[in-house]
Amino acid sequence: MATRQTKLKIGIVGAGSVVKNRHLPALKKIPDVEIVAVCNSSYESSEECCKKYIPEAKPHANWAELVAEPDIDIVWIGTPPYLHSTIAISALEAGKHVFTQARMALNLPEAEEMFAASQRNPHLVTMVCPPPHGMRGNLFIQKLLAEDYLGEPHHLRLQSLSGKYTDPDAPPHWRQRDELSGLNVLTLGIYAEVVQRWFGPITHVFARQRTINPVRQGYEIRIPDMVLVLCKFENGMAGVMEFSGVAPFENSDRLQVFGNEGMLSYDFSSDRINGGRLGEKDAVEIEIPPELEQRWRVEEDFIAAARSPASIQPQPNFAQGLQYMRVVQGVADSIALGSEIEIAI
């Protein structure tokens, strides 16, 4: 077990750009952590990755062989979502801690299977990669809400707009391919995780979608280009969330929430927070106190939890990932049925 070893050994399955540019540099800075194996889409790409980034690691052609390696303590999954469930469950049953890239799984049944596997192995640590969106101001927002800055929150608006899919002649991005991404649409899963962390569970959704460019180079696009979601939270707050990849000249991610005593807004591109309370003249920018600024330390947090699984719980774990996948599934079901969907919490 990992807790009986001085050095934690990691096997990486799927070494794409996020793993190479974000996770690898951070993991290499942590003492007593060793990346010992890599499995990419082919043996050749695994070997190339090892030579360029981790010369001490062993390349693999098959992820199952990597998972079966007895000296590996952690399986770090960086593949697209279509492999997350199969690899994560196999790794947990093999006695490995599991870190997986967002989004958690193709759909809710797969996420439920991942969570069930984590419950069968409570001594192992699981984590879904958290979004950087809102991370810097996360603790401060939670403090403001705990201090009832808004009073009773009643209305939430979230916009996540970009023009990344406006070119009709561009090939399909892998995030537009449902065989790779499943039900995950644009940044829906990311923001379902963020808003539920701050405001509690979403209990109902009613969604509409459009696909502006339904065929790309002969490939039929089945993941929407835009989605509008009406939602209700357990605390009674109503919300509207708008996601688009076909908004020309836009690149904005912004949250506004209104209560009976004030409002808060969060610009996710700049981590700027604005707020105002009744009786004040205007809403103004609120500086994040330096002692509450939260930096990216995802890799450090996961490794610390793997060293002490009984006392540290990294977030989001598979339970929290399951909750946002319920929203993703609910949105897909609402689009398919044309009706409001109630979400289990």
Image (spheres, rainbow, N blue to C red):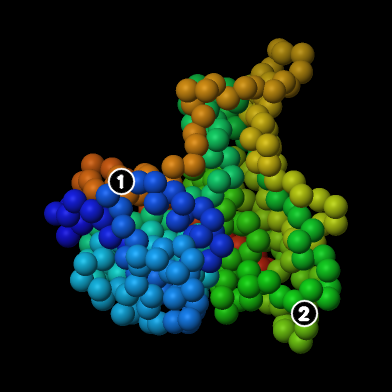
> Mark 2 = which residue?
216
Q: Nearer the viewer, residue 315 or 234?
A: 315
Find numbered disc 2 in the image and state the secondary structure of the residue it sits on: strand
Q: Amino acid at mark 2?
A: Arg
Q: Is residue 15 left or right of residue 209?
A: left
Q: Position of residue 108 (x, y in %)?
A: 47, 67
Which quadrant holds the N terminus? Answer: bottom left
The residue drawn where x is 64% and y is 76% is: 177
Picture disc at residue 248:
none
Q: Secondary structure at mark 1?
A: loop
Is residue 105 something one can see in this rendering? no
> Which sits in the foreground, 108 or 136?
136
Residue tagged 1: 31
Instruction: Mark 2 and mark 1 in contact? Answer it, CB < 8 Å.
Output: no
**Residue 116 x, y percent position in the rendering:** 31, 65
> Residue drawn at (69%, 17%), measured in percent from left and top?
278
What's the distance in space between the residues labelled 2 and 1, CA to CA?
A: 46 Å
Classify mark 2: residues with Cα within 10 Å, few (<14), some (14-19) or many (20+): some
